[in-house]
Amino acid sequence: MSQEAYFDAAAAAPWHPVARQALLAALDDGWADPAKLYAAARRAAQLLDAAREAVAATLRVRADEVSFTSSGTTAAHAAVLGGLAGRAGAGATLVHSAVEHSAVLHAAGRHAAGGGAAVPVAVDRVGRIDLDAWRAAVTGPDVALAALLSASHEVGTVQPVAPAAAACAAAGVPLFVDAAQSVGRIPVPAGWSILSASAHKWGGPPGVGVLVVRKGTRWSSPYPPDEREMGRAPGAPGLPAIVAAAAALRAAEDEAAAQAARLAPLVDRIRATIAARVPDVEVVGDPVDRLPHLVTFSCLYVDGEALLHELDRRGFAVSSGSSCTSSTLRPSHVLEAMGVLSHGNVRVSLHRETTEDQVDRFLAELPDVVATLRAEAGMPR
Amino acid sequence: MTVPDQVLDCRGQRCPLPVIALAKHLPHLPVGAVLRVLADDPAAANDIAAWCRMREQELLGPTQPHVHDVLRRH
């Protein structure tokens, strides 16, 4: 039985070797409270400062604009709720794409439940926002904040952040970009006022997120007061993990172009082969203007949960946007917003340890898996 | 209000069963006939619409929740 081929980097990438080393090295000095005056605290503070500087340098921002949070999800929550709170005087409306990560949508829902408004902007068949609709939405009355992810975690489509940001700037509306799938992989476009990212997407540890608030952006903490992390993330920062996250980001950034060049053709191969060898399949998302490492496809007449189980049995770890695989039993809001088939859905996301052989084995076995499940459902082919 | 030629009651069935039922039954109706699928799975509306697009069949305008009328075009 072969080793499991892990194809779910979009959820969490395996440890970058540099991250593991940095984590272990940070244990000795990374336990004390960095805010205190004594020697142990100063050593911890040095680690935290160095991690912050490294992340700031990679993102081309100032160190004091960077806060470490407990996850990409809490970074996104704080970005939305803090951005809205900071601009409460200007309005109570959040404009967001219809395909944001669920963390952003849940924050929007919290805002709406509290009396605010959240306006979704529709996307086209490949999941890209309608720029005319975006411009109309952000120039509406009462808009406090806009949110647009840099690239879709579900289908890979890259969003037009630069023109969307220009529209926001012209309207005087700050833009929050959830850059979780871009940081450490592809360049993050300029023009945002608030940014969030997630360390385990780039091979850092779980439990570390990044929130960046540019100087001059009105942002007001949605939490009870806490001085740590510039008042943007309460509680003791998870220091050894943060050190590991910063080291992994630097390494991922150094390798990003090479990894993209290596993985993009593998994804091209997956897209083409699935479309050619699996009948009645929808391979979704922009085939060209997309993340290099990710592809999603939906197979007609196939139960998504059964598909994941069979692929797992054969040693492939993938995820799915099908409703039967979700704890909420709702289909992926991203696939729904795009109007593409949601059942029988598989998301494949590759990483630095993915080999061509693993991809070839997946492509050799998948058509048979789909055919078998269809036959069991009484569908031809 | 459309009067369908056949009604498939797929309420309580999880995806992809309603779409499979649609795909199995529509070919047995004449071109121009309307097949009504009753389906309450949360993905049904989206996936029946996607099937119609993929198969170039026509999904008739929204009637009531959980009611999906497909007209056989070819």
Image (cartoon, grey):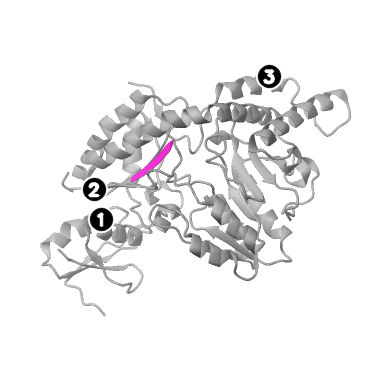
Magenta highlight on residue A342: no
Q: Which residue is mark 2?
A: A280
Name which quarter of the figure residue A205 lies in: top right
Magenta residues (range): A293-297
How much space separates mark 1 and mark 2, taking CA atoms?
8 Å
Q: Is residue A274 or residue A5 the one in the foreground? A: A274
Q: Position of residue A138 (x, y in %)?
A: 59, 64
Tell me the subunit letter for badge 3.
A
Is residue A99 positioned above or below A30 on the image?
below
Q: Main secondary structure of the magenta part?
A: strand
Looking at the rendered structure, the kind of residue marked 1 is Met
Which structural element holds mark 1? helix
Q: Which residue is mark 3?
A: A25
Left or right of B67? Residue A102 is right
Looking at the rendered structure, the kind of residue marked 3 is Ala
Looking at the rendered structure, the kind of residue marked 2 is Asp
Task: Report the residue at 60% width, 24% height from top.
Answer: A19
How much space separates mark 2 and mark 3, taking CA atoms?
51 Å
